[in-house]
Every structure is written in C-alpha cells, then in structure tokens.
Image (cartoon, grey):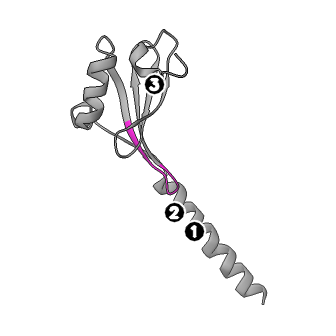
Amino acid sequence: MKSKINKLWFVMMLTSMSFIANAQDRKIPKDQIPTQIKTFIATYFPNNAVLKASFDNHPVYKKYEISLTDKVSLEFSPDYKIKEIKSKSKLPNEVIPAQIL
C-alpha cells in the first residue's frame, strides 16, 4: 500500500512540475510582435519604444506582456485585446474607459 502511495505522489509531482515548466514566459523578438499589438502601441504610445515582449503560456491563462520605455507595461489577451495598462506617467485619454475618465 505504501508503495502505491509513493508512486502516486511521484506521478503527481511530475505532473505539477510539467505545468510549471510550461508556464514560463517565452520571449518574443520585437519584429515578431503581433501586428495588432504593434498598431495599438503605435497609436496610443508613439513616443515609447518596446523594451521587452513575451508570451506567457500558462495552463490556466495566456497573455502577451509588453514593456515600454517610461515604465509602461501592457498586457494583452491571446486575441490581442488590451487587458491591463500600468504606467508611472499620464495615460492617453483614449485608453481610459469613459466611465473612469
């Protein structure tokens, strides 16, 4: 009985480690950022350069993460819709929902 429990525990650990290994960010070269994301950046943040781009392929969620100059961070869904914007400076009014603005 103890042997079966140990085997089950081992299988569970391997499974969880495979999820963790798959959940790592995959860096995206600047020239391979999806066109919709590039368009969003060019439209609303034309004075900010892309510092880093990655795709987080977590088993539960997937997202694009883009870091721009001036401490601007953008998060996009897999279908290239903006999900979150973080910035230390003023955001363009066009990216702020009307109810908040």
Local secondary structure at mark 2? helix
Which residue is nearer to you in this view: 46 or 66?
46
Taking the spot 26% from the left edge, 35% from the top edge, the residue there is 36
Task: Give yes or no for residue 60 being in the magenta stretch.
Answer: yes
Taking the spot 71% from the left edge, 79% from the top edge, the residue there is 6
Amino acid at pointer 1: Leu
Task: Give yes or no for residue 89 being in the magenta stretch.
Answer: no
Give the residue number, with chain letter if any, for mark 1.
Answer: 14
Taking the spot 28% from the left edge, 14% from the top edge, the residue there is 46
Q: Where does the N terminus fall, quadrant-wise?
A: bottom right
Amino acid at pointer 2: Ser
Give the residue number, with chain letter if any, for mark 2.
Answer: 18
Q: Quadrant of residue 95?
A: top left
Local secondary structure at mark 1? helix
Q: Read off the magenta span.
A: 54-61
Give the residue number, with chain letter if any, for mark 3.
Answer: 73
